[in-house]
Amino acid sequence: MSNFDYDLFVIGGGSGGVRAARVAAGETGAKVALAEEDRYGGTCVIRGCVPKKLMVFASGYPGMVEEGRAYGWDISLGGFNWDDFHGKLAAELDRLEGIYRKLLAGSGVETFDARARLVDAHTVELSTGERKTAKHILLAMGGRVSVPDVPGIEHAITSNEIFHLPQLPKSILIVGGGYIASEFAGVMNGLGVKTTQFYRGAQILRGFDDEARGLVAEEMMQRGVDLHLGTNVERMEKVEGGIKVTATNGSEQVFEQVMYATGRAPNTDDMGLEEVGVKLGRKGEVLVDDYSQTSVPSIYAVGDVTDRVNLTPVAIREGMAFVDTVFRGKPTPVDHDLIASAIFTQPEMGTVGLSEEDAAAQEPIEVYATSFKPMQSSFAGKSDRVLMKLIVSKATRKVLGCHIVAPGAGEMIQLAGIAVKMGATKEDFDRTVAVHPVMAEELVTLRSPIRET
Ligand code: NDP
């Protein structure tokens, strides 16, 4: 008999924490508790992937109506009712949170709607004042938005607030060039908001394949996003009708809203971590080994709080591997290699493996790519372009990277990701007969390299 209150105490009710708690309690019979100070479901469900994707859907209809007209439909675009959409969005998030709570209860996990912090290697203290002990503690607190210290930053919103605006603004400035900034620039523009984006560097989506992010940026501008590269905010002040923004290039403009999407930081402040001996990295992330174990043997950590690959499916994998390791006696490291992902810009980008630049720095490669006007929008008289690109190792013939910029690229890369993860060669792609007529058929009909290094 254990002397602890629980076998496992999980801090954080997001994707990673909930999955680990449910599986440990429901499938291994462990006695599990979980504390969440905010809403169950975490960033992804409550203020991230899920509401974002619903907003991406909402913002796509004006383009569809326009295209429909070109196909002979006698339709025109009416107005967008933000209150209506927002009400439905809030109800959907309530529904999803309810499911998360039900799943936990159904697996026998005891939940505390409270903040928890560490007291020692086996004890947490809840904001209610109660203390609980556990043989193992799992840190799954996720991350939070991080904004720079710019004069007037208090006037700006972040991705936390964008889903709850009382009304849709007439104009918005989005600051940043990462996933969140670029996705919301597309969403706001699609919803009819005059959208400006400032990015301090030379091209948005740093770290992704240059050709792919270049095309995304071009297409975003063509759809109406006023993208300013090499530009940042110097200061902001509240004025009649909005926020006056002075840019680093000296220009001044008033926007009804300014949204910062300048990165996220691990949620490790004031958790008692270092006092207990849990080592943190430079950004405040919890340092873990391949099995998600921290420097304190009874304490593990999964998801964004560890700042490994900050994506929901990765946190879920880490949570499951933790349960296998600790509760099933099967030490399981998480494989963080070749994770396919999608960026819901407009057009979408789907990517797996190495960018051309990273692959070329590693070994001799061949680059196969084609960029073309897809049938559906081309028929409607639009000049939209898509990109299908493969990076191939000269030595092994393996596909090292696959990059797709196209409507539906997220769906496509999920499938291409299986082949790449299996180690498919260019010749494996070539002997796959095309599906016709679809955009992705180009991935199996790329004949000769456009570049070699
Ligand atoms: P990112 O780290 O992706 O991007 C941050 C952006 O802000 C970069 O363009 C960065 O510029 C810029 N920036 C940083 N500091 C400043 C500053 N002081 N002034 C101006 N610009 C600045 O963060 P996000 O917030 O976009 O997203 C956070 C994480 O959430 C992502 O890393 C990802 O893991 C996850 N996510 C994933 C999604 C998906 O899979 N589709 C969608 C949304 C989020 P620079 O490039 O110069 O550093």
Image (spheres, rainbow, N blue to C red):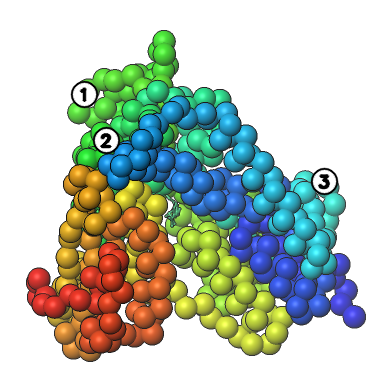
Crowding near the residue tagged with mark 2, few <14, some 14–19, many ≥20 C-alpha atoms within 10 Å:
some
Helix, strand or loop for disc 1 = loop
Q: Which residue is mark 2?
A: 224
Pointer 1 local density, CA inside 10 Å: few below 14, some 14–19, many at least 20 = few
Q: What residue is rendered at 27% in x and 64% in y?
A: 439
Q: Quadrant of residue 414?
A: bottom left
Which residue type carries mark 1?
Gly
> Eyeballing the image, is 43 above or below 420?
above
As drawn, is 130 to the left or to the right of 90?
right
Q: Is residue 388 above or below residue 87?
A: below
Closer mark to the observer between disc 2 and disc 3:
2
Mark 3: few/some/many CA within 10 Å (<14, 14-19, 20+)? few
Q: Earlier in the sequence, mark 2 or mark 1?
A: 2
Residue at the image position 18 percent from the left and 88 percent from the top:
395
Q: Nearer the viewer, mark 2 or mark 1?
A: 2
Query: CA–CA distance between discs 2 and 3?
Result: 50 Å
Q: Is residue 84 left or right of residue 352?
A: right
For label 3, being within 8 Å of ligand 1 is answered no
Q: Label 3: which residue?
A: 128
Q: Which residue is mark 1?
A: 250
Disc 1 vs disc 3: Cβ atoms closer than 8 Å? no
* Kind of residue indicated by mark 2: Gly
